[in-house]
Image (tube, rainbow, N blue to C red):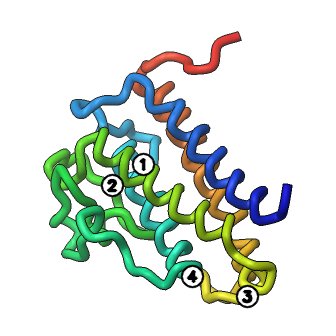
């Protein structure tokens, strides 16, 4: 297995991990939160997808996919697409289902973003993976960014696990 294969697989594995914890969520509770939980499911899927697409731009040079994201004032999302301002870093999730895609559509957008980044990392040459790119408050190599985003997906998976528990949705992994 090449390092490119490993990077691609890290994103796809983090996708699969997050998706397994969507059991029990539906269109009625996709924007529900509890007092001590920072994010709801719709926000999490949109936030992770936006972040993955932004990283994928460094590989393929394409902007955000039309029909998945629009840039508005944070309230312009709907049943088919996310408003980038409602799911970007520093945004605050709101219990307003009309401002977020349906759960199935949010899942499709997240899966699309994972596939795009995995394809970019999987087909990149060593020089491309070593390329320094701007991210957050500095620059990092693309290969490090891919690994960071696999971890990012994992972090948000942990939040979904906590949210599941708080909403009484039960365990997904049983002994």
Determine whether the residue tagged by mark 3 lies in a helix, strand or loop. loop
Locate residue 1 relative to residue 171 in the image: left or right: right
Determine whether the residue tagged by mark 4 lies in a helix, strand or loop. helix
**Frontmost residue, 143 versus 93:** 143
Distance between the alpha carbons at the discs numbered 4 and 3:
9 Å
Q: Nearer the viewer, mark 1 or mark 3?
A: 3
Instruction: List the residue tagged with mark 1.
Output: 39
The N terminus, quarter of image: bottom right
Q: Residues within 10 Å of mark 3 (few under 14, many from 20)?
A: some
Locate residue 90 relative to residue 123 in the image: left or right: left
Q: Nearer the viewer, mark 1 or mark 4?
A: 4
> Mark 2 and mark 1 in contact (Cβ < 8 Å)?
yes
**Frontmost residue, 128 versus 54:** 128
Instruction: State the image quarter where residue 137 is shown.
Output: bottom right
| Picture disc at residue 131 | 3
Determine whether the residue tagged by mark 2 lies in a helix, strand or loop. loop
Of the image marks 1 and 4, the number of the one nearer the N terminus? 1
> Which residue is drawn at the image coordinates 46% and 41% (left, top)?
36
Of the image marks 4 and 3, the number of the one nearer the N terminus? 4
> Mark 3 and mark 4 in contact (Cβ < 8 Å)?
yes
Distance between the alpha carbons at the discs numbered 4 and 2:
27 Å
Instruction: List the residue tagged with mark 2.
Output: 93
Determine whether the residue tagged by mark 1 lies in a helix, strand or loop. loop
> Which residue is drawn at the image coordinates 44% and 32% (left, top)?
22
Residue 113 placement (x, y as % from top left): 47, 60
Instruction: List the residue tagged with mark 4.
Output: 58
């Amino acid at each position: 297995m090449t390092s490119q294969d490993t990077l691609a697989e890290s994103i796809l594995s983090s996708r699969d991990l997050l998706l397994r914890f969507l059991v029990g969520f539906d269109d009625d509770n996709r924007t529900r939160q509890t007092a001590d939980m920072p994010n709801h499911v719709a926000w999490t899927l949109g936030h992770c997808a936006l972040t993955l697409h932004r990283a994928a731009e460094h590989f393929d040079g394409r902007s955000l996919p039309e029909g998945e994201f629009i840039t508005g004032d944070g309230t312009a999302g709907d049943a088919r697409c996310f408003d980038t301002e409602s799911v970007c870093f520093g945004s605050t999730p709101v219990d307003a289902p009309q401002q977020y895609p349906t759960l199935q559509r949010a899942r499709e957008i997240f899966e699309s973003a994972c596939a795009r980044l995995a394809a970019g990392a999987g087909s990149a040459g060593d020089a491309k993976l070593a390329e320094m790119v701007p991210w957050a408050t500095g620059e990092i190599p693309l290969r490090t960014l891919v690994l960071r985003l696999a971890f990012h997906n994992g972090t948000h998976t942990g939040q979904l696990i906590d949210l599941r528990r708080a909403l009484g949705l039960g365990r997904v992994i049983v002994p």
